[in-house]
Amino acid sequence: MTSPQQPLEPHHHVPDPGHGHGAGHEHGRGAGHGHEHGHGAGGGGGHGHSHSHGPAAPVSRHLRKVIAAILIPFAAAVVVGLVALWPGGTPAHERTGVGFDRQTEQGEVVSVERVDCKDVNAAQVPPTGDTSTPEGREAVNSQQGQCEKATVEVTSGPNKGRRFVEVVQPDAPRQLHEGQGVVVAYAPDAPHDLQYSVTDVNRKLPLALLAGIFAVAVVVVGRMRGVMALIALAVSFLVLTYFILPAILEGSNPLVVAVVGSSVIMLLALYMCHGLSARTSVAVLGTLISLLLIGLLGSLFIDWASLSGNTDDNTGLIHGLYPEIDMSGLLLAGIIIGSLGVLDDVTVTQTSAVWELHQADPGMGPRGLYRAGIRIGRDHIASVVNTLVLAYAGAALPLLLLFSIAQSSMGTVANSELVAEEIVRTLVGSIGLVASVPVTTALAALVVSADRPASGGGKPVAVRGGRRRRAK
């Protein structure tokens, strides 16, 4: 019978089926790490655990110290930046009544009556019969057909219960119906009969339902990871709402605010979703390097292309209300924040791929791991870049349609500031994504291959499941 004091074979764990807690841990150079727990002082068998199919083996204490030496100062700097830039709240201003800068209340359509458009539009400028211009066609249509005369009741605010009439033209893109919830604008300085008007419909219910379906789908498929992902999403939204936006409105540099805010989101989201591990830390480092590249490229080309960041009614309104905000810096901040989500996906995927490759073949060196990981990354690059470009193109589709209607050349379209902003945004973000693949793969390959516990020589032997052979 084999004595428990006999020497063990190299790189194998000897089962010892005794009972009661005894011996410690032995780590081999196999595909994972094994734990042997000896039970009792007597002879007999135990049980061994091989984790080649579970979470990645923890890295050595030395590598943890190296990673911590890099990330802890970075995290400390982020916290200092967060405290230094923390806003006291959104600065107050006098409402202009333009666009989103209006006081709004909730309302409900009480009744809808169909009337002759000529009767309700009698006060408008009479049509000239010229339908060659949009204004002429609108004037003609306002005197023809059946209009809707909706009675709307205000359901919130100091004038709750007050009713007013809203006339809806037959060619209006949004028609009203009885019982429909609406958003009404309130202009206290206007004449009494003109203080309220319908500006939008209340779509909170379908949006809330869609968000609920999304949350259920994430939790059902992702389980605990899905729950943590939703929590991380909520944290990201809170950082954006309570730090990034108010800090920019207070006059802080948009680029600095975006870098600090993105770093907070990156650290919290990655560690909450993927755990506090060396694998996640490598993904954080890869994301950070890629964000720095995006910031540098974005700053260079926004300045070189003379992009002002003030290209539409919304940015014009922001600049009018808060002229101290650097609009080109705001554009760069948007590029950095917009690229962060896709970067997280790429860096985590590449790090996990390299870790799994090392688990499958522990003898593979850093060069082999990099080559195998980069092959996976090339497929990821193709799909992610295409996704990013199409996402921006989809968002700018109405604008592109206008250029198509005007029969403008491709060069003219690309040279316009509206489109040039999207081109710079897309290409700078895509370059950062492409660069994140080799950067993260190289970091992961160096870290995981350098973490090889010392043993008594010999080639690495993969530890397989099942009972281990005893030493004779």
Image (tube, rainbow, N blue to C red):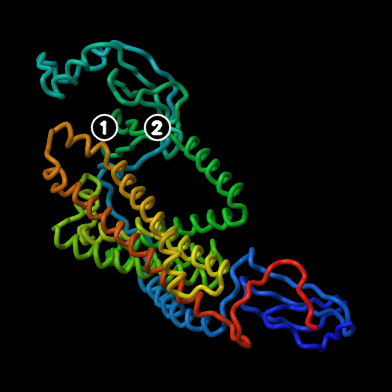
How crowded pointer 2 is (Cα within 10 Å; few <14, some 14-19, many 20+) is rated as some
- Dot label at residue 201: 2
Q: Please name whichever residue, 401 or 368, is drawn nearer the observer in this view of the structure.
A: 368
Q: Is residue 466 left or right of residue 220?
A: right
In the image, residue 198 lies at what x, y percent? 34, 31
Residue 32, image quadrant: bottom right
Q: Please name whichever residue, 194 or 374, is drawn nearer the observer in this view of the structure.
A: 374
- 325 to 95, vertically: above or below: below
Q: Please name whichever residue, 116 or 432, is drawn nearer the observer in this view of the structure.
A: 432
Which residue is depicted at the point 40% across and 18% down?
112
Name which residue type carries label 1.
Pro
Q: Is residue 353 left or right of residue 27?
A: left
Q: Is residue 109 left or right of residue 219?
A: left
Tag 1–tag 2 contact (CB < 8 Å): no
Residue 60, image quadrant: bottom right
Q: CA distance from mark 1 to mark 2?
A: 24 Å
In the image, residue 401 lies at what x, y percent? 22, 35
| Residue at the extreme front | 472
- Dot label at residue 191: 1
- Dot label at residue 393: none
Name which residue type carries label 2.
Val
Quadrant location of the C terminus in the rendered image: bottom right
Q: Is residue 364 left or right of residue 248?
A: right
Q: Please name whichever residue, 455 or 165, is drawn nearer the observer in this view of the structure.
A: 455
Residue 9, image quadrant: bottom right
Q: Is residue 249 visible?
A: no
Quadrant location of the N terminus in the rendered image: bottom right
Q: Nearer the viewer, mark 1 or mark 2?
A: 2
